[in-house]
Structures are given as structure tokens and as C-alpha cells.
């Protein structure tokens, strides 16, 4: 069965320039917050037609440099799904960052109200451990996701 595709723009597509700007701001806030290392970003969204779409992005952050370990097409797929999620063009979306350093650590954000909000660490831990119960891979240390600065909100409006 083919994997569901990322939402595509059509005549009614709401993926505005503002949403693309929010996606760019989200990435520029996310990568420094994750810090140095190799990170796998995964975004999963429930589309309005009931199917699920997901995209991965592998990035390496080093002092003064950033490397995306994907083709242009894969990067665009990730960026567009993030854009649609931030534009509320999907029912539900979650972004998870997994970092490989001395072990694996992961944190996650819910997409709500056009921005990335840290997931409840306990709920995220339950989800990660239930998904990896039968997986022989090394255990994942669940961490609290950093709050990402929203570029258009004052300090008092941040959640």
C-alpha cells in the first residue's frame, strides 16, 4: 500500500506565505534549541481526509554550521508538511526530534494555534515506550522539549 502523500496545494490551499514564514521561523528556533549533534526530525500529521502523512529530516548542527542530510525533494516535503501543519490545514500534527549522542534522546511538540508547543513529557514518554516495547533498538531517553520563541508574540503571550 503506498504511503499517503504530503498535502498538495490546490485552488483552496491555505498554505499562505505567512504559514511558510512560520515554518521557517519554527526551524530557525528549533535547530539552535536542539543544540549540537545529529538530529532526526519527524513530523506526522493527520490529514483532513483521514489519512496520515509524515516526513523526516536529518540535520547535523555543529558550531557555525548546519548540514541537512537529505535531498532537496525530501527537504521540501518536510518543509511543506510543517507549513501545512502550522497553517492548521491538517487535523493534528506532532513534531519529534531524536538526537544521537551518548545515547538516544527524544522530545516532542504538538502543533497548535500555528506554532510548536512542547508536549507533556509524561504523555510523550508513555507514547515512546509503548511504540518501542517490541523494538530491539537502544532505549530512548525522553526529555522535556524546549519552548520555542514565537517570532510574533510578546513574552506575556507565550505558552
Image (tube, rainbow, N blue to C red):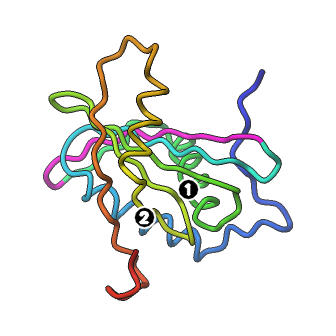
Q: Position of residue 63 (x, y in %)?
A: 13, 52
Which of these two is toward me, 120 or 2? 120
Figure quadrant of residue 39: top left
Q: Position of residue 45 (x, y in %)?
A: 63, 48
Q: Residues within 10 Å of mark 2 (few under 14, many from 20)?
A: many
Q: Which mark is residue 82?
A: 1
Q: Which quarter of the rendered picture does the N terminus lie within?
A: top right
Figure quadrant of residue 113: bottom right
Looking at marks 2 and 1 on the same chain, the residue that comes earlier in the sequence is marked by: 2
Q: Is residue 99 above or below residue 45?
A: above
Q: Residue furthest right?
A: 11
Magenta highlight: main SS: strand
Residue shown at 79% from the left, 45% from the top: 50
Q: Is residue 29 above or below residue 65?
A: below
Q: Secondary structure at mark 1?
A: helix
Mark-to-mark CA distance, 2 and 1: 9 Å
Q: Is residue 101 above or below residue 118?
A: above
In the rendered image, residue 1 lying in the magenta stretch gets the answer: no
Q: How many numbered badges does the structure rendering display?
A: 2
Task: Give the residues in magenta.
Answer: 51-64
Q: Position of residue 131 (x, y in %)?
A: 49, 26
Q: Secondary structure at mark 2?
A: helix
Q: Which quarter of the rendered picture does the C terminus lie within?
A: bottom left
Q: Residues within 10 Å of mark 1 (few under 14, many from 20)?
A: many
Figure quadrant of residue 11: bottom right
Residue shown at 73% from the left, 70% from the top: 14
Left or right of 9, for residue 104 = left
Q: Position of residue 61 (x, y in %)?
A: 23, 47
Residue beneath disc 2: 26
Residue shown at 25% from the left, 58% from the top: 32
Proximity of marks 2 and 1: CB atoms separated by less than 8 Å: yes
Amino acid at each position: 500500500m503506498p504511503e499517503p502523500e504530503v498535502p498538495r496545494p490546490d485552488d483552496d490551499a491555505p498554505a499562505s506565505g505567512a504559514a511558510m514564514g512560520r515554518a521557517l521561523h519554527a526551524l530557525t528556533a528549533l535547530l539552535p534549541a536542539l543544540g549540537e549533534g545529529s538530529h532526526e526530525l519527524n513530523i506526522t500529521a493527520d490529514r483532513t481526509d483521514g489519512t496520515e502523512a509524515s516526513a523526516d529530516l536529518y540535520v547535523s548542527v555543529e558550531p557555525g554550521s548546519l548540514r541537512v542530510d537529505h535531498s532537496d525533494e525530501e527537504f521540501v516535503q518536510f518543509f511543506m508538511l510543517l507549513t501545512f501543519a502550522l497553517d492548521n490545514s491538517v487535523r493534528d500534527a506532532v513534531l519529534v526530534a531524536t538526537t544521537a549522542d551518548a545515547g538516544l534522546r527524544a522530545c516532542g511538540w504538538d502543533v497548535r494555534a500555528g506554532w510548536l508547543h512542547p508536549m507533556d513529557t509524561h504523555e510523550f514518554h508513555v507514547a515512546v515506550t509503548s511504540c518501542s516495547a517490541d523494538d530491539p533498538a537502544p532505549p530512548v531517553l525522553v526529555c522535556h522539549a524546549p519552548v520555542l520563541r514565537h517570532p510574533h508574540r510578546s513574552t506575556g503571550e507565550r505558552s
